[in-house]
Amino acid sequence: MIAPNKLNRQFNPEQLNTYWSGDITYIRTQQGWLYLATIMDLCSRRVISWAFSDKPNSELTTRALRLAVQNEELVVMWFFTPIKGVSTRVLLIKAH
C-alpha cells in the first residue's frame, strides 16, 4: 500500500508544529559507530528532539519521536521506508 503524499513536496509549512521530519545519521567514535536520530519541525527548521544508539533501528527512531511528542498534543501519521537496507521510520506529524 502506498501512503498518500500529504506534503506534495511543499516542505515550507507556514505554521509551527504542523509537520515534522526525521532522519538518522551515523558518527564514528573510538568505540565504534554511534547513530543519531533527529526530529525537525519543517516550519522553524529547528531540531526539536534527538536520540543516540549503537544500532540504527526502529527503537532509535521511536525514542526520538517519543521525546518530541512528550510536550506536544499531536496526531501522529507514520510512514515506513527502507533506507540502505535498514528498516527505519520516516515520519510526518500533523497537529490537531
Image (cartoon, helix red, strand yellow):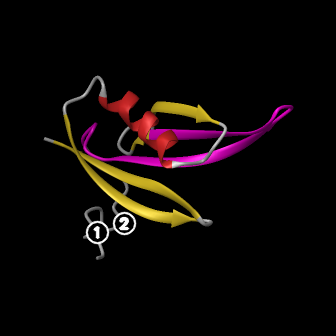
Identify the residue at image location x=45%, y=35%. Answer: 64
> In the orientation shown, which residue stands out farthest toward the top?
71
52 is within the stretch colored magenta? no
Disc 1 and disc 2 in contact, CB within 8 angstroms: yes
Q: Is residue 48 left or right of residue 5?
A: right
Label 2 sits on a secondary structure element that is loop
**Mark 1 residue crowding within 10 angstroms, few (<14) / some (14–19) / many (20+):** few
Identify the residue at image location x=45%, y=65%. Answer: 81
The segment highlighted magenta reads 15-39
- The image quadrant that residue 69 belongs to is top left
- Hey, what amino acid is under mark 1? Asn
Q: So how many labels did they put on this image?
A: 2
- Hey, what amino acid is under mark 2? Arg
> In the orientation shown, which residue stands out farthest toward the left?
96
Q: Position of residue 5 (x, y in %)?
A: 28, 69
Identify the residue at image location x=63%, y=47%. Answer: 25
Q: Is residue 57 above or below residue 65?
A: below
Residue beneath disc 1: 5
Label 1 sits on a secondary structure element that is loop
Q: Position of residue 8 (x, y in %)?
A: 30, 68
Secondary structure that dominates the magenta span: strand
Identify the residue at image location x=37%, y=56%. Answer: 11
Q: Which of the numbered marks, if any, corresponds to residue 29?
A: none
Report the quarter where the N terminus lies: bottom left
- The image quadrant that residue 40 belongs to is top left
Q: Is residue 66 above or below residue 12?
A: above
Report the quarter where the C terminus lies: top left
Q: Position of residue 71 (x, y in %)?
A: 28, 23
Residue beneath disc 2: 9
